[in-house]
Image (cartoon, rainbow, N blue to C red):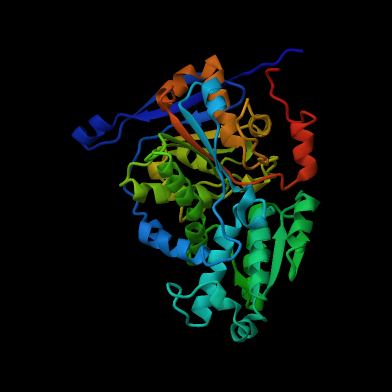
Amino acid sequence: MKYNYIKRVYIIFTDNLISKINNIRRDRMIKYEEHFGINIISTNLNNSTNVDFLTEDIVNDVEKFHTSIDEYKKTPLVKLDNLASKLGVKNIFVKDESYRYGLNAFKGLGGLYAIFRIVCDKLNLDYKSTTFKDLQNKDIKEKLKDIVFVTATDGNHGKGIAWAANKLGCKSVVFMPKGSVLARAKAIESMGNSTVTITDLNYDDAVRKAASLADENGWYLVQDTAWEGYEDIPNFISQGYTIMAKEALDELNELGIEKPTHLFIQAGVGSMAGSVLGYMVNRFDKKPPITTIVEPATVACIYKSAKADDSKPHAVTGDLQTIMAGLNCGEPNTATWPILRDYASFYASCPDYVTARGMRILASPLKDDKKVISGESGAVGAGLLSMLMEKDEFEDIRRDMGLNKNSVVLIFSTEGNTDPKGYDEIVYDGRNFSPFI
């Protein structure tokens, strides 16, 4: 059986020096023939967007809240020395979020913090001095028992919202897009006090449905994407996500590493990616690691927006399908898009087999490397890194990215096997196999 691998890809570079001298922007386009359906572009770094809602002081407040929760503990930062040696880089670190709050994914970080801020605002509490334990007071719980939080989700975010609401004695209503895995719906219901509906809508329309019902019923919409007139709560969610980035950098510092040279981070609407990158922009004085934003090829709204090169967010529409359910989002978060636009170095759209490859690599550790159970939305960064470093066809791109024997690479595995059946089919049975085998 033969395959036609080659696709035409464009990588866009801007000559910053000439732009500065002539006060104009002049793009020169370099063509590459890339293989295996992976598209990568690079645009000039703007470094102009203010990221003042993700400052170190704000993140310290978020950390203070999370550390007041009994279940809080740092998730592992896994050092894969043997994989790094095989791929030809100095270090590979994987932040394993499958251990977060017993939720098998990172999403509880954002949902719980947003609900906390909503409750503090409703009860006129100072969020800087209020702890999660304070909200367990019987009198406070009595005031909160009739609150309903509503959201749309592919699974992980909804599970986090249901968990957080239940912790405070509140109710939640969760809408899921068509094609959602039943196991993920049942996982949300298992959190308690939650009504879960798998709709016949795509993700973005499910978000609109949740927003409409929130208005009609006086519920609180807790959605991890922003639009005009709805920015505060999504920003609270993004602030909550920063904890995994702060933990990772603090853990690296304990190993004597000030900062990674490269960051591979996946995006759906871009809330988590913008959160992590934005925090690093502030922590490293607008000099974050060389960052690649990674998305499913069929739902690459950040990639599409970067490629349009007009500074605006652009949606991907239609019947959107990918095994990366957590990244199956067609419309960028308008609050975090400017961060990704101005501070990311590369944008990649990847077929599903790339994340399946990453899942298998992380599940099959070399020598004494530790195994990482990473789900479909968690492993695409690892899969892309392996392709870039192992395939000769990517030699020019990895040179432009500065990936070499001195590179210290940080990857976030944002979920575990949230769909156990699907995970086994990919890792054990070879579903979504690589096209070059």
Q: Quadrant of the C terminus?
A: top right
Q: Position of residue 246 (x, y in %)?
A: 45, 51
Describe residue 378's horizontal placement relative to residue 236 as left or right: right
Q: Residue at x 47, y 59 (%)?
A: 239
- In the displayed structure, 186 sits above or below 245; it is below
Q: Position of residue 392 (x, y in %)?
A: 53, 14
Give the camera-side residue of 325 and 368. Answer: 368
Give the camera-side residue of 136 and 105. Answer: 136
In the picture as drawn, the residue positioned furthest to the left comes out as 21
In the picture as drawn, the residue positioned furthest to the top comes out as 2
Q: Residue at x 77, y 13 (%)?
A: 1
Describe residue 214's horizontal placement relative to residue 9 as left or right: right
Is residue 389 something that shows in the picture?
yes
Q: Residue at x 72, y 57 (%)?
A: 176
Describe residue 284's horizontal placement relative to residue 225 as left or right: left
Q: Say which quarter of the image contains residue 351.
A: top right
Is residue 199 something that shows in the picture?
no
Give the camera-side residue of 364 and 162. Answer: 364
Give the camera-side residue of 41 and 191. Answer: 191
Q: Residue at x 53, y 65 (%)?
A: 113
Q: Position of residue 309 (x, y in %)?
A: 42, 39
- In the displayed structure, 158 sits above or below 192; it is above
Tag count in the figure? 0
Q: Position of residue 153 (x, y in %)?
A: 67, 56
